[in-house]
């Protein structure tokens, strides 16, 4: 037998055992990373263990390995851990051929409306902003590239969730949907709203994430998967201009789908 094969094999362990063990580690790591993504400000090892149903010692070993690869990092003075910078770098590399194509269209949309326009994609149970153009208004919304927010509370999150089946949404989000404002919605209300989004093609955040701020979003399908284009504005202004915002979103979505792929709501 090859000496290298002898050294890599454990007593009583065959190739199937090692393959199953590797798959189990990947599955556990995926669950832990999803838990980290749901807590952008950090979560303790005990909190992760409770959320994913694994022993704390197992969670600690996996998180230590993720930290070594910069896929997770200590959350600072708050304690615990959060997703690390390497994940953002991987996402950026993945989106590198989508964002440059979308950028001039998003910039034109922002300039035409004089409102903030964003491009985003699902990242675990969150949406993550990939590109932002800030509107030229005295009162304007200024989100940062890389910012994440809960899927169930944002227009872009709901636009992207609407591409899933109700069962997929339940599995993806789970039952616990923490509110942010008194207008935030629970799972049953969200599922009903997603049906409306599938019909209309537009999703809304009516002060569900941040008081005084609202948004309208439409998803686009590309060869890299689904993205969302979102217009964000102070609530009073968005409510008064929502019809023109939807019309402008439709034109931009159509133009990008011609370039990047065919979408289906």
Image (spheres, rainbow, N blue to C red):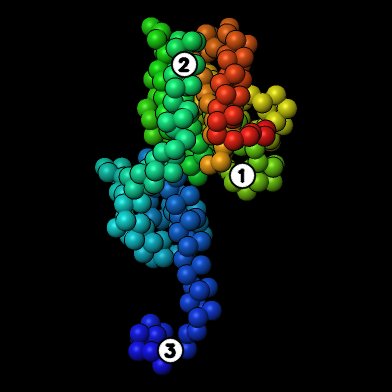
Kindly check if marks 1 and 3 are in contact, taking CB atoms under 8 A apart as contact: no
| Front residue of this view, candidates 259 and 6 | 259
Kindly check if marks 2 and 3 are in contact, taking CB atoms under 8 A apart as contact: no
Residue placed under numbered mark 2 in the picture: 108
Residue 161 visible here: yes
Closest to the camera, between mark 1 and mark 3, is: 3
Find residue 11 and name its label: 3
Height in image: 143 above or below 248? below
**Which quadrant of the figure contains the C terminus?**
top right
Closest to the camera, between mark 1 and mark 2, is: 2
Please, what secondary structure does the residue beneath circle 2 have?
helix
Q: Residue at x 57, y 24 (%)?
A: 255
Closest to the camera, between mark 2 and mark 3, is: 2
Residue placed under numbered mark 1 in the picture: 175
**Residue 107 in which image quadrant:** top left
Q: Residue at x 51, y 67 (%)?
A: 23
Height in image: 15 above or below 231? below
**Which quadrant of the figure contains the N terminus?**
bottom left
Sequence-wise first label, 1 or 2: 2
């Amino acid at each position: 037998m090859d000496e290298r094969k002898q050294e890599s094999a454990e007593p009583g362990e065959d190739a199937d055992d090692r393959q199953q063990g590797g798959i189990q580690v990947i599955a556990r790591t995926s669950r832990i990373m999803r838990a980290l993504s749901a807590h952008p400000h950090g979560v303790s090892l005990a909190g992760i263990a409770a959320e994913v149903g694994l022993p704390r010692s197992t969670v600690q070993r996996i998180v230590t390995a993720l930290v070594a690869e910069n896929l997770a990092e200590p959350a600072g003075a708050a304690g615990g851990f959060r997703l690390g910078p390497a994940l953002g770098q991987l996402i950026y590399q993945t989106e590198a051929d989508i964002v440059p194509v979308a950028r001039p269209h998003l910039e034109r949309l922002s300039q035409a409306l004089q409102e903030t326009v964003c491009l985003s994609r699902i990242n675990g149970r969150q949406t993550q902003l990939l590109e932002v153009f800030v509107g030229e208004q005295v009162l304007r919304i200024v989100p940062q590239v890389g910012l994440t927010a809960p899927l169930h509370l944002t227009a872009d999150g709901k636009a992207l969730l609407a591409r899933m089946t109700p069962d997929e949404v339940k599995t993806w989000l789970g039952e616990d949907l923490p509110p942010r404002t008194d207008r935030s919605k629970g799972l049953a209300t969200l599922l009903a709203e997603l049906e409306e989004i599938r019909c209309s093609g537009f999703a809304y955040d009516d002060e569900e994430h941040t008081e005084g701020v609202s948004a309208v979003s439409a998803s686009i399908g590309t060869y890299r998967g689904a993205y969302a284009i979102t217009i964000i504005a102070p609530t009073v202004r968005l409510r008064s201009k929502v019809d023109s915002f939807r019309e402008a979103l439709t034109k931009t979505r159509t133009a990008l789908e011609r370039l990047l792929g065919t979408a289906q709501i």
